[in-house]
C-alpha cells in the first residue's frame, strides 16, 4: 500500500523532507530519510492521516483498543493557538490525544507538543492529598495554612501563575488581588512582552486570504506552531508572498521565495520601519497580514508594536500579535498577566509548577497548587492540583476567541478543581467567594467589562472526526 499521503503531507503542508520511499517496485516502503528519527514537530499528523493505520503513535499503540476508550472534544492547553483536540481516556487515564478539526483555527492539524505531551496526567507519583511541610493534611488545614502564610504580605508576596491558567481562575485571582492579596507581585510564566490589544486583532483564518505575510520577531514553528502551517498554506497553495524579520534561521527558509531579513536582536522595529518601501508591499494586491512576536523578550515592544501599527496603516494591513502563553490574552484581560520580578519576596504562592527561574532565595514560605512532587515541597504547603485533562474553564486564544475546556477525566476525590480551591482560599482570607459551580463564575465574568474579543466559538465546530 503506497498512497503517499504521509510524504505528501510532509512535503506540502509541513515543508519538511524527512519522509521518503525506499526500495523500488513491490519492495517499496515508507521510511525516514537516511533512517534518521523524524525531527519535525508536526510529525504526529501522519498518524491521523494514514488511511490504513500503518503509522501509529508509539505512546499510545498497544495500550488499548479504540472501543475500550471514551473520547471528548476539547482544547489543547499547550500554547496560545488553541487547537481543537480529542482526548481519549481509559479507566481514568489519558491514553491518547488526536486532532479534532476546527477550520477556523487548526484545519485538523496539531503539533507534537499537543499530541504527545500528556503523560504527566497519568504519572503514578501525582499528588493526591494536601500536605503541610511533608505531612498529609486535610484540605481545610492546608488552605488555612496557605492563607496564614500569604495574608497581609503586600509586595512581600510573590504569585507565580502558569501559562494555562483558565479565565475563571484568572477572574478569581483578580478578586483576590483587588482584596486580601492587594499589592502582591505577580509573574505569569511563558508570556510574551506584548501588551493587551486595543481592539479586535486579525483572525487565524484570515491568513488564508493574505497576499503578503510579514512575520516579525517570532519563530512561528516554536511560538505558535499551527499558525506556522497556516502561513505555509497561504504561501505554498495560495501564492502569498512572505517576508520574515528574524535574527536566526527559521523553517520558512526552506522556501526559496521567502524574503528573510536578519535583523540584529532588539532591532526588529527599525527593519519594520524600512519595510514600508519594500517592493512586495508597494502593490500587494490584497490583504497584508502582519504577525509580530516579542523576539522571546529581546525586542522593545513599545517600539515594535508602534512600527507594526504604522506599517499596517501604510499598506492597509491587519495585525496579529503573537501571544505565546496558552491563556495570555485571557490573563491580560483579567489584569493578572503580571511581569513582576519575584526576587526579594518573602512568601511565594505558586499556582502550577514553581517559577521557571527557580524559587528566590529570599522566600521563607512556599505554598503551591501543583500536580507533581518537586524538590522543596517537603517544607512547603502543597495543594494537589487538577491537570488540563480534569479541569473545567475556558481559554482565550491568540486571536481572542474564548473556547471552553471539556475535561475527559472525572476528578478523583479528594482532588478539587482550581476554581474551588481559590474560592476556599478566598473564604479563608476573609473574602467569601461562594460560587456553586463554574457557570456562576462565568456568568459573573460576563458582567465585567469584556475583552475586545470575538464571540466565543463552540468547540464542536467542523466535520465529525474521527
Ligand atoms: S499549536 Fe499549540 S494549541 Fe495547537 S496542538 Fe500545538 S501546542 Fe496545542
Image (tube, grey):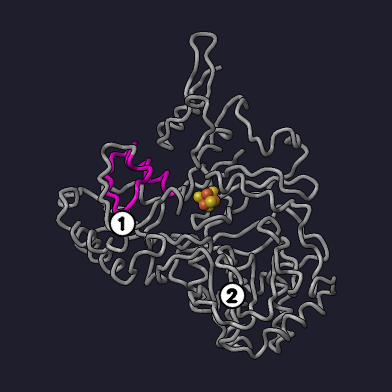
Which residue sits furthest front?
361
- Judge whether residue 17 is colored magenta: no
Q: Position of residue 283 (x, y in %)?
A: 16, 50
Write the residue at 41% across / 68% down: 193
Question: Pointer 2: what residue?
Answer: 360
Give how far apart the Cα atoms at labels 2 and 1 are: 38 Å
Res 402 visible:
yes
Write the residue at 83% across / 63% down: 413
Q: Nearer the viewer, residue 126 or 92?
A: 126
The quadrant of the image that shows the C terminus is top right
Q: Nearer the viewer, residue 312 or 435?
A: 312
Residue bounds of the magenta highlight: 227-253
**Label 2: few (<14), some (14–19) or many (≥20) C-alpha neighbours in 10 Å:** some
CB of mark 2 near ligand 1 (< 8 Å): no
Q: Is residue 338 above or below residue 8?
A: below
Indicate left or right for 167 with 279 as reference: right
Give the number of the mark in front: 2 or 1: 2
Question: Pointer 1: what residue?
Answer: 290
CB of mark 1 near ligand 1 (< 8 Å): no
Q: Is residue 373 above or below residue 337?
A: above
Q: Secondary structure at mark 2?
A: loop
Choose the circle earlier in sequence order: 2 or 1.
1
Q: Secondary structure at mark 1?
A: strand
Indicate left or right for 447 with 69 as reference: left
Amino acid at each position: 500500500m503506497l498512497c503517499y499521503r504521509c510524504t505528501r503531507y510532509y512535503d506540502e503542508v509541513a515543508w519538511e523532507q524527512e519522509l521518503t520511499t525506499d526500495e523500488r517496485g513491490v519492495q517499496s516502503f515508507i521510511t525516514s530519510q537516511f533512517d534518521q528519527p523524524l525531527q519535525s514537530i508536526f510529525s504526529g499528523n501522519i498518524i491521523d492521516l494514514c488511511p490504513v493505520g500503518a503509522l501509529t503513535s508509539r505512546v499510545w499503540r498497544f495500550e488499548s483498543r479504540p472501543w475500550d476508550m471514551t473520547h471528548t472534544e476539547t482544547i489543547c492547553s499547550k500554547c496560545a493557538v488553541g487547537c481543537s483536540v480529542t482526548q481519549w481516556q481509559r479507566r481514568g487515564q489519558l491514553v491518547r490525544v488526536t486532532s479534532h478539526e476546527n477550520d477556523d483555527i487548526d484545519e485538523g492539524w496539531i503539533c507534537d507538543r499537543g499530541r504527545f505531551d500528556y503523560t504527566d496526567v497519568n504519572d503514578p507519583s501525582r499528588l493526591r492529598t494536601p500536605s503541610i511541610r511533608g505531612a498529609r493534611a486535610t484540605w481545610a488545614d492546608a488552605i488555612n495554612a496557605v492563607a496564614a502564610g500569604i495574608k497581609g504580605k503586600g509586595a512581600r508576596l510573590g504569585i507565580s501563575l502558569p501559562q494555562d491558567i483558565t479565565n475563571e481562575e484568572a477572574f478569581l485571582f483578580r478578586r483576590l488581588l483587588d482584596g486580601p492579596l492587594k499589592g502582591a507581585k505577580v509573574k505569569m510564566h511563558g508570556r510574551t512582552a506584548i501588551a493587551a490589544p486595543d481592539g479586535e486583532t486579525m483572525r487565524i483564518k484570515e491568513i488564508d486570504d493574505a497576499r503578503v505575510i510579514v512575520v516579525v520577531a517570532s519563530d512561528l514553528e516554536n511560538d505558535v506552531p499551527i499558525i506556522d502551517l497556516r502561513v505555509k498554506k497561504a504561501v505554498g497553495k495560495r501564492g502569498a508572498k512572505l517576508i520574515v524579520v528574524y535574527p536566526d534561521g527559521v523553517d520558512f527558509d526552506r522556501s526559496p521565495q521567502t524574503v528573510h531579513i536578519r535583523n540584529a536582536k532588539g532591532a526588529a522595529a527599525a527593519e519594520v520601519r524600512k519595510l514600508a518601501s519594500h517592493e512586495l508591499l508597494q502593490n500587494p494586491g490584497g490583504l497584508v497580514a502582519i504577525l509580530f512576536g516579542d523576539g522571546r523578550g529581546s525586542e522593545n515592544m513599545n517600539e515594535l508594536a508602534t512600527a507594526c501599527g504604522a506599517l499596517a496603516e501604510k499598506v492597509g494591513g491587519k495585525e496579529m500579535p503573537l501571544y505565546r502563553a496558552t491563556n495570555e490574552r485571557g490573563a491580560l484581560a483579567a489584569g493578572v498577566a503580571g511581569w513582576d520580578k519575584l526576587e526579594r519576596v518573602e512568601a511565594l504562592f505558586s499556582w502550577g509548577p514553581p517559577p521557571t527561574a527557580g524559587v528566590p532565595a529570599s522566600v521563607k514560605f512556599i505554598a503551591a497548587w501543583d500536580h507533581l512532587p518537586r524538590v522543596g515541597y517537603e517544607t512547603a504547603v502543597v495543594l494537589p492540583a487538577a491537570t488540563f485533562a480534569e479541569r473545567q474553564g475556558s481559554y482565550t486564544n491568540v486571536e481572542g476567541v474564548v473556547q471552553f475546556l471539556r475535561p475527559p477525566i472525572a476528578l478523583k476525590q479528594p482532588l478539587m478543581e482550581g476554581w474551588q480551591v481559590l474560592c476556599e482560599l478566598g473564604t479563608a482570607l476573609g473574602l467569601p467567594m461562594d460560587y456553586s459551580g463554574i457557570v456562576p463564575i462565568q456568568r459573573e465574568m460576563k458582567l465585567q467589562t469584556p475583552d475586545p474579543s470575538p464571540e466565543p466559538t463552540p468547540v464542536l465546530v467542523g466535520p465529525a472526526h474521527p
